[in-house]
Amino acid sequence: DQQVKQNSPSLSVQEGRISILNCDYTNSMFDYFLWYKKYPAEGPTFLISISSIKDKNEDGRFTVFLNKSAKHLSLHIVPSQPGDSAVYFCAASARAGGTSYGKLTFGQGTILTVHP
Amino acid sequence: DGGITQSPKYLFRKEGQNVTLSCEQNLNHDAMYWYRQDPGQGLRLIYYSQIVNDFQKGDIAEGYSVSREKKESFPLTVTSAQKNPTAFYLCVSRGPSYNEQFFGPGTRLTVL
């Protein structure tokens, strides 16, 4: 049962254009969402996060949008740069206690390629 | 220089052998996690520990064991009972904030 899904395995965009990576979730208990960037043979690095009390969070070229009613979030990268080429994972967490405190549930990842 | 390290980077194991993956952090974090990454799949939680001398099974704990005798260390043993151990293993150390999730560089385990 995949509670967090990234339905696009890959995305290819031109340098300078917008990259939009999508993520859907099914568990209504999730209240905190994170995006990670991962290069081959390295661990993921934190990119940006959003709490369920917000619908948008912006950090430089990166903006995350959250649509709670649709259980959907997206990461926008504007403008895209070749150095952004990596695998992007979305992750979700239910912070409100429970035995899985701190556990992140990850999507499958989307490979982003930005062409010069 | 604070951080989280994993060793070795690459590990080869023969079938039927147990092998232990190291994870060390000097961030003074209480919580540590082990994830496994397979191609086309998200990271899946194997075990986690919120405090020294305590750990909990994650989603795919079968065939794995852990210990948490020291705050800095959270080694993962892949036993011969793990049917499909070839994967990329990631250790995570987490601070008080959810944004403070630091991933180690990973260990790629290959069973020959």
Image (tube, rainbow, N blue to C red):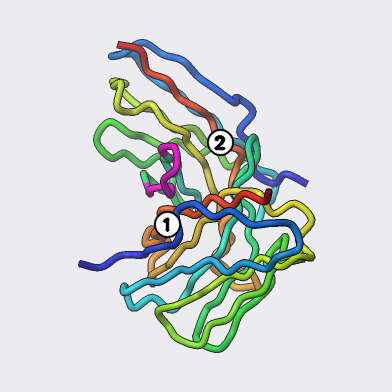
- Determine the chain carrying the residue at label 1: B
Task: Give the secondary structure at mark 2.
Answer: loop
Name the one closer to the observer, B67 or A67.
Answer: B67
Residue B37 shows which numbered tag?
Answer: none
Name the one closer to the observer, B28 or B110.
Answer: B110
Residue B103 shows which numbered tag?
Answer: 1
Q: Amino acid at mark 1?
A: Phe
Q: How many marks?
A: 2
Left or right position of A101 against B92: right
- Residue extending farthest to the left is B1
Task: Give the secondary structure at mark 1.
Answer: strand
Quadrant of the image occupied by residue A75: top left
Left or right position of A106 against A113: right
The residue that disc 2 covers is A109
Q: Is residue B15 above or below residue A109?
A: below
Q: Crowding near pointer 2: few (<14 within 10 Å), some, many (20+)?
A: many
The magenta segment: A39-46
Question: Can you see residue A40?
Answer: yes
Q: Amino acid at mark 2?
A: Gly
What is the C-alpha distance between the residues marked 2 and 1?
Answer: 16 Å
Position of the C terminus of chain A, as image quadrant, is top left
Measuring 54% from the left and 22% from the top, which residue is drawn there?
A: A10
